[in-house]
């Protein structure tokens, strides 16, 4: 491996815990439905749900949160979703996996 290539670790090993599965249940939608609505790869949503994501682009994160809010609005809910509905950072869980 090249000395310039940095190894990326999954989000759970860095203290980021997924909350997306609970959000999907709350909205009663599938991972695939969110991927379609957010126009992101289904594998990206899957990796976020399982905690295996190694990085996320801000544009992708915005697309996911915007899609959650659109779905919520279309279902007549008043809740506004935010980053904590995708993942939560807990520094006490860092490197504990």
Image (cartoon, helix red, strand yellow):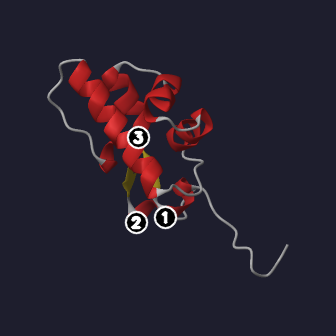
Q: Residue at x 43, y 28 (%)?
A: 37
Using the rendered view, name the quadrant where residue 22 is placed: top left
Give the residue at mark 1.
Answer: 94
Provide residue 12's location: percent of width, then percent of height.
53, 54
Relative to 50, does residue 6 appear above or below in the rendering? below
Seen from the viewer's position, the closer of residues 42 and 87 is: 42
Q: Quadrant of the C terminus?
A: bottom right
Asked whether the beta carbons under mark 2 and mark 3 sit within 8 Å of each other, the answer is no
Label pair 2/1, CB-CB below 8 angstroms: yes
Secondary element at image label 1: loop
- Residue marked by disc 3: 64
For numbered disc 2, what is the local secondary structure?
Answer: helix
Residue 34 percent location from the top left of the image: 45, 29
Foreground: disc 2 or disc 3? 3
* Residue, far bottom: 3
Which mark, by number, is residue 91?
2
Label 1: how many residues lie within 10 Å, few (<14), some (14-19) or many (20+)? some
Which image quarter holds the N terminus? bottom right
The picture quadrant where one finds residue 93 is bottom left
| Image point (62%, 37%), residue name | 43
Question: Is residue 43 at all visible to an observer of this figure?
Answer: yes
Q: Is residue 86 visible?
A: no
First of labels 2, 3 by sequence position: 3
User: Which x, y percent locates residue 58?
Assistant: 43, 57
Q: Residue at x 25, y 20 (%)?
A: 74
- In the image, taking residue 1 as reference, residue 14 lies left or right, namely left
Separation of marks 3 and 1 at Cα, in angstroms = 24 Å
Residue at 75 percent across and 80 percent down: it is 4
Q: Position of residue 80 (x, y in %)?
A: 20, 38
Tell me which numbered mark, 3 or 1, is placed earlier along the sequence: 3
């Amino acid at each position: 491996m090249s000395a310039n290539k940095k190894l990326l670790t999954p989000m759970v090993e860095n203290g980021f815990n997924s909350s997306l599965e609970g959000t999907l249940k709350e909205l009663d939608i599938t991972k695939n439905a969110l991927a379609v609505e957010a126009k992101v790869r289904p594998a990206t949503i899957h990796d976020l749900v399982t905690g295996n994501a190694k990085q996320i682009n801000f544009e992708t994160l915005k697309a996911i949160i915007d899609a959650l809010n659109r779905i919520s609005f279309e279902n007549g809910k008043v809740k506004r979703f935010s980053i904590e509905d995708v993942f939560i950072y807990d520094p006490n869980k860092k490197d504990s996996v």
